[in-house]
Amino acid sequence: MGAGKAARRPLEGVTVVSLEHAIAAPFCTRQLADLGARVIKVERPGSGDFARAYDDRAQGLSSHFVWVNRSKESLTLDLKQPQAMQVLRELLARADVLVQNLAPGAAERMGLSHAQLAPSCPRLVVCDISGYGNDGPHRDRKAYDLLIQSEAGFLSVTGTPEEPCKAGISIADIAAGMYAYTGVLAALLQRQQTGEGSHVEVSMLEALGEWMGFPMYYAYEGATPPPRSGAAHATIYPYGPFAAGDGKTVMLGLQNEREWKAFCERVLQQPELAVDPRFDSNSQRNRHRDALKAIILEAFGHLSAQQVMDRLDEAQIANARVNTVGELWEHPQLRARGRIAQVDSPMGPLAALLPPGVHSSFDYRMDAIPAVGQHTEAILMELGRDAPAIARLRAAGAV
């Protein structure tokens, strides 16, 4: 714990049971665990969450799994078996939250919808995460992250003029996971007022659709949508990556005409460009991007990337390095602020980014990544099973 911080985190005492796999639901529940919730992750006996097998890049563990599953307990249950379903129902009777991202309709078929659980678990918050929602014509369609990026129009505004490009991360899963997280927090706050649980339903399409708000309004009522422009801004120029003379790339962004004047005078050292009619407004610079790009690259071609950034800093124009993901682990700002921590795992300690945000009253929980079924026996004993009963469940393949 940091100096002067309370020992109790805001969600300590809250129990979350999660029927989760892949990214969206695990990302939601990891945020809850970060705040102190007890998260019991229900996995298939033997193999567990299939995301465990995506790769082995993190000291033999899956990079996806390591990222979204720390600070959880792993309980293996074969929910096709009545004894396993009985264990789950006993857990839910004690739990505060159920999160699930099973196949469409699967939770309802098992009797685990909010409507089915509410009579026996009136204080339970049930959060369903799906691709398209619990009803509508697309309800039963498979919904992988890339498919949702496509359906939500994200690909239409991402990439180059010649070719659309997906995001390099699971952006639709992440969006859905974050809205599920905030939805669960809101439901827990509401329960403090009403004493009753509620139903939170989040779809990947609606979550990513919200993030598409700017291009949707830009193309409102049939207007021309923003063009795909690679790493450059679609509607502001110059705003994007530019190569320097040493082969490195600098990202810069101009926001207004004052900065444009400073850019011409102090960075390009060509003050006459500020009043050139081809470039004297953002709309004109957008129309004449190719001509302006050639001028900028010619000027930058005589400088190193660091010299370009020094000039940009002196002109108070926003800029950044184009880092690799490997360089992010060593980013001087993250290191200076102590944002790189360590978590334990079945393969030993692993580096981990602390969650975003710094709280004055508590530290985030940063506990171990669980092995498949690591906590099964302890949870079963907590529910009153003795060693012979647990042995029978194991022999039957229920856990």
Image (tube, grey):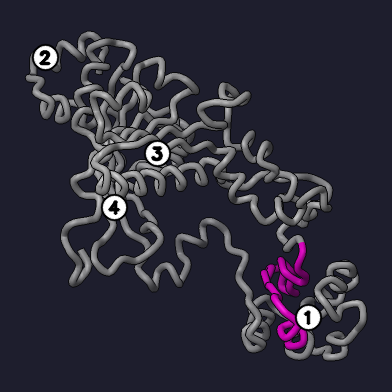
Q: Is residue 21 above or below residue 337?
A: above
How many marks the image carries: the answer is 4
Question: Where, by quadrant of the figure, is residue 42 drawn?
Answer: top left
Residue situated in front as seen by the camera: 337 or 275: 275
Residue at mark 4 to residue at mark 1: CA–CA distance? 50 Å
Residue indicated by mark 1: 302
Would residue 43 appear left or right of 62 to someone viewing this image?
A: left
Q: Nearer the viewer, residue 97 or 356?
A: 97
> What stretch of residues is rendered in magenta?
235-263
Q: Quadrant of residue 132?
A: top right
| Residue that protrudes farthest toward the right in the picture | 277
Residue 377 vertical placement versus 10 (above, below): above
First in residue order: circle 4 vs circle 1? 4
Report the quarter where the N terminus lies.
Answer: bottom left
Location of mark 3 (residue) = 26
Task: Please tell me whether mark 3 sits on a helix, a strand or a loop.
Answer: helix
Give the mark toward the camera: 3 or 1.
Answer: 3
Q: Return the x and y of residue 166 as percentages of the image width and height.
A: 66, 44
| First-in-chain label (3 vs 2) | 3
Between disc 4 and disc 1, the foreground one is 4
What element does badge 4 sit on? Answer: loop
Residue identifier under label 4: 35
Residue at coordinates 76% horizontally, 52% vertically from top-left?
Answer: 220
Residue type, numbered disc 3: Pro
